[in-house]
Image: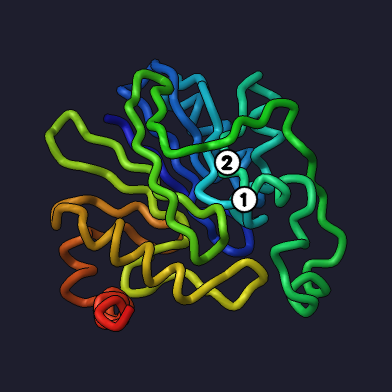
């Protein structure tokens, strides 16, 4: 499996392209602010053709370029129904201070939007498991794929980072929900699962189980539910 990733925009949100190989169809995950130009360069370099745009959640730094990319290539944007409104009203997910700091922002509703559910997706020849992981936003998801080498890749958006987790203090965030998502979904994955987060470097589930204090807290908190 070919995985191409790069950070984009002021928030350095990671955008990913996944395909069975060069010269094939691909899925684009989280094309956020200022992602269009580096994305198009990557498509040309690897001779890839987008088959879909996938959103791990609806925050602006992950979907600001979604409509531009999807409409230019005639494909749909896939997002959970809980976060769909953020494609047309991104300020809804921000507090007043954050919204004021952004000033005027451009955004557009994609021509075609499809809602993610619990069922897996088959796109660009890839079988993609969709795990609903609310907490950072109500519609946050993790995308999981099996690699040809036998391992698994998890695109965790802003649910799990190397050494940390996503914030829950913005509108729609919920600390109890993200703890439950970490405990029931991510902690159950194999240790060698490669984590491709929404910000920062890649990691593995085993490394995060051993060193990420928030995963330990999610387990302790679950014991008292």
* View extreme (front): residue: 225
Q: Of the numbered discs in the image, which one, if any, rests on residue 59? A: none
| Location of residue 22 in the rendering, given as x and y in whole percent from the top left corner | 35, 21
| Location of residue 127 in the rendering, given as x and y in whole percent from the top left corner | 32, 27
Nearest the viewer among 187 and 11 is 187
User: In the rendered view, would you say 131 is above or below 59?
Assistant: above
| Location of residue 77 in the rendering, given as x and y in whole percent from the top left corner | 61, 33
User: In the rendered view, would you say 70 is above or below 166?
Assistant: above
Secondary structure under tag 1 reads helix
Q: In the image, which is nearer the foreground, mark 2 or mark 1?
A: 1
Q: Is residue 20 left or right of residue 65?
A: left
User: In the rendered view, would you say 210 is above or below 105?
Assistant: below
**Among the 4 quarters of the image, the one containing residue 46:** top left
Q: Where does label 1 land, which residue?
A: 82
Q: Residue at x 49, y 38 (%)?
A: 117
Q: Where does label 2 land, which residue?
A: 79
Q: Residue at x 54, y 74 (%)?
A: 168
Count neighbours of disc 2 (C-alpha within 10 A) and say few if under 14, some if 14 to 19, many if 20 or more: many
Nearest the viewer among 133 and 62 is 133
Secondary structure under tag 2 reads strand
């Amino acid at each position: 499996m070919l995985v191409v990733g790069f950070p984009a925009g002021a928030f350095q949100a990671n955008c990913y392209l996944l395909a069975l190989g060069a010269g094939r169809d691909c899925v684009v995950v989280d094309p956020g602010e200022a992602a269009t130009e580096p994305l198009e360069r990557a498509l040309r370099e690897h001779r890839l053709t987008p088959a879909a745009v996938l959103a791990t959640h609806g925050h602006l730094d992950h979907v600001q370029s979604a409509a531009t990319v999807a409409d230019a290539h005639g494909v749909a944007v896939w997002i959970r129904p809980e976060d769909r409104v953020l494609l047309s009203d991104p300020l809804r997910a921000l507090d007043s201070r954050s919204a004021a700091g952004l000033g005027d922002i451009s955004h557009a509703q994609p021509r075609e939007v499809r809602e993610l559910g619990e069922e897996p997706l088959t796109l660009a020849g890839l079988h993609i498991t969709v795990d609903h992981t609310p907490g950072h936003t109500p519609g946050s998801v993790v995308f999981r794929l099996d690699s040809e080498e036998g391992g698994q890749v998890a695109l965790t958006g802003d649910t799990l980072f190397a050494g940390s987790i996503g914030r829950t203090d913005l509108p729609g965030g919920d600390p109890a929900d993200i703890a439950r998502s970490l405990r029931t979904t991510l902690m159950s994955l194999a240790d060698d699962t490669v984590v491709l987060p929404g910000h920062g470097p890649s990691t593995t589930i085993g490394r995060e189980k051993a060193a990420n204090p928030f995963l330990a807290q999610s387990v302790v908190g679950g014991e008292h539910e």
